Structures are given as C-alpha cells and as structure tokens.
Image (cartoon, grey):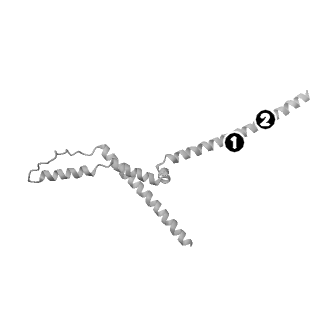
Amino acid sequence: MAKEDQNKTDRKEQIEEELKLLETKLGQQFEEIKTGVEEKVERTKSKLRPAYWIKRYPAYCIGAAVALGFMIAPSRKKNRNQDYQKNERQSARPQYNQRLPVQEQQPGIFDIAAQEIKHMLTRKTTDFLMMKLEEQIDKNLSKRKKE
C-alpha cells in the first residue's frame, strides 16, 4: 500500500511538473503570437497613413497631386471665355459672330470641396518637398564639415 501511495505521489508530481511546463510553453507561445499580431497591426497602420506613401514614393505622389489638381480645378479657359463675352457685350458696336451668353454659376459644394482638397494636397506636397530639400542640404553640409 505504501508503495502504491509513493507511485501515486510520484506520478502526481510528474504530472504537475508537465502541467507547469505546458503552461509556461503556452504562455510563451501566446506572448509570441500577441507581439507578432501587434507588429503586423502597427505595420498596417503605418501603411494606411498618407505620409508613408509620400515618403516611399514622392515622385508618384507629386504626379498624382498635380493630376488631381488639374482634374479638380475649374478650367481657366472657361473663365477667360466668360470675360471675353462680357467685354463683347459691353462694346458699343454690334458683333456678328457673337456667342450666346453663358449663365454664370455660383460654385457648388463639390467645387468648394475640390478646391480645398487641391489646396491641402498642394500644401502637404510642398511641405514634404521642402522637408526633403532641407534634409539633403543638411546632409551635404554635415559631409563638408567632416571633410
């Protein structure tokens, strides 16, 4: 009977040690998974920020900002055409090749929003370019000072 009790206690201690070992391994694996997921979340967050893409592909971003500016901005030709028509109407002599007057429209919400987006993109791009230019100048100056 004493031998059986000894075997049971030995087996119980062995199982407890295995259980503690499994718990520590499980805890370590959980921490590894947790840190891996946190790192992936941070990388994904950084890639969703516009600054990441501007720093990584500055030329493409500038091109896209310029293209958006031209697509969104109201046409200057249309404004010049309206000014020309106003001048024709104001002149005293009759015009035979006169175009029909174009109704002047107030800018809508889309025009206002587009103009604001264009201004913001231009400002951000200019700030970024100036920052990069200053960095290059600082690098060149620091190299010259070392020499």
Q: Is 94 left, or right, of 82 in this rendering?
A: left
Identify the element where label 1 is drawn: helix
Among the two numbered marks 1 and 2 on one chain, the one whose residue lies closer to the N terminus = 2
Give the residue at the far front of this rendering: 97
Identify the element where label 2 is drawn: helix
Q: x, y (%) of residue 78?
A: 24, 49
> Is the residue marked by circle 1 packed among few (<14), some (14-19), or many (20+) residues within 10 Å?
few
- Residue designated by label 2: 16
Q: x, y (%) of residue 69?
A: 35, 50
The quarter holding residue 59 reads bottom left
> Is the residue marked by circle 2 packed among few (<14), some (14-19), or many (20+) residues within 10 Å?
few
**Which residue lies at the image location 85% right of the left edge and 30% below the top edge?**
8
Q: Is 137 left, or right, of 38 in this rendering?
A: left
- Residue designated by label 1: 28
Q: x, y (%) of residue 104?
A: 21, 46
Residue 61, compared with residue 29, is above or below; it is: below
**Which residue lies at the image location 30% right of the left edge and 46% below the top edge?**
111
Q: What label does residue 67 carry, if any?
A: none
Amino acid at the residue labelled 2: Glu
Quadrant housing the N terminus: top right
